[in-house]
Image (cartoon, grey):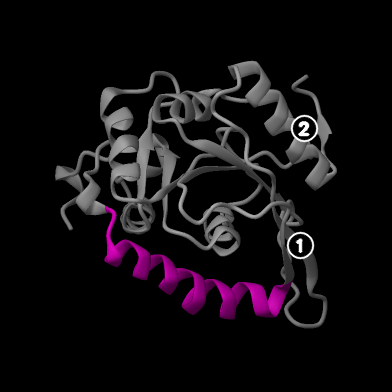
Amino acid sequence: MNLKKINFFQKKAADFNIWTRLYQYYTLYILLKPFIEFPFYNIKIEKKAKLDKNKLYIVAPNHISYLDVFFVNMAFGRRLAYIAKQELFQTETWGQRYVTKNIWRLGAFALNREKVGLSTIKTVKEVFKANFNLCIFPQGGIRKNRTIENINGGFVYFAKTNKIDIVPMAIVGFEEYNWVPFIKKKDAALKLGTPISYELDEKEIVDEWCKQICEMSGYENKNC
């Protein structure tokens, strides 16, 4: 894979395929569960509402760890593509190239948080064309302060322009990593909320997302 020739902001529907899904299963069930969940965490998955199996959704989690992408896949259990900040696609060092290659294979593509480009907008449409759901983190980056604030409205824009409802998801218990295997397993939870209609106005969507995340996680809501 020649990373220098890749436009990380753009993918076609054909790029979201069976190989993407198999790679997601590989990272989740071969790497994450045996080496992270089983030794270190007791993870509970909760679903507040039954999701329509015939609909596509935008999954919008809070963001508290580098493992959140895998946790979203674990809880949601459907085809997923991911929007990731463009900084994750830097390729100057070996470590950066390794991260870039793997998140690209997972179905991620880049977003300029300062100005959403046309390539990203088109790629979101290709995601839904491929019958994949979309994961985007409204907080933009990792926040470990147990508060919900300064929410980026990009997830609302993508919901409205593509007429896709939003599923809030609370990731709880990974604010601090557990480094003691087996002896002291840490409790954690992945909670899927009630879908929010894209037909609501932007403020209503953001307020409802914040409300559900705070109710499911116990975090303080500073966005309202």
Q: Amino acid at mark 1?
A: Ala
Q: Amino acid at mark 2?
A: Lys
**Residue 14 rendering spot, x and y as whole percentages:** 20, 52
Instruction: For residue 55, say whether it is visible.
Output: yes
In terms of depth relative to the viewer, which is nearer, 211 or 165?
Answer: 165
**Residue 76 rendering spot, x and y as whole percentages:** 56, 58
Q: Quadrant of the N terminus?
A: bottom left
Which label number is shown at residue 211? 2
Q: Residue at x 50, y 40 (%)?
A: 136
Q: Element under label 2?
A: helix
Q: Quadrant of the C terminus?
A: top right
Q: Residue at x 34, y 36 (%)?
A: 124
In terms of depth relative to the viewer, which is nearer, 113 or 223?
Answer: 223
* Residue 6 horizontal side relative to residue 166, left or right: left
Residue 201: say if magenta. no
**Mark 2 vs 1, N-terminal side:** 1
* Residue 194 horizontal side relative to residue 141, left or right: right
Part of the protein shown in magenta: 16-41
Tell me which corner region of the image, top left, top right, bottom left or bottom right, holds residue 146: top right
Helix, strand or loop for the magenta stretch, by majority:
helix
Instruction: For residue 145, say whether it is visible.
Output: no
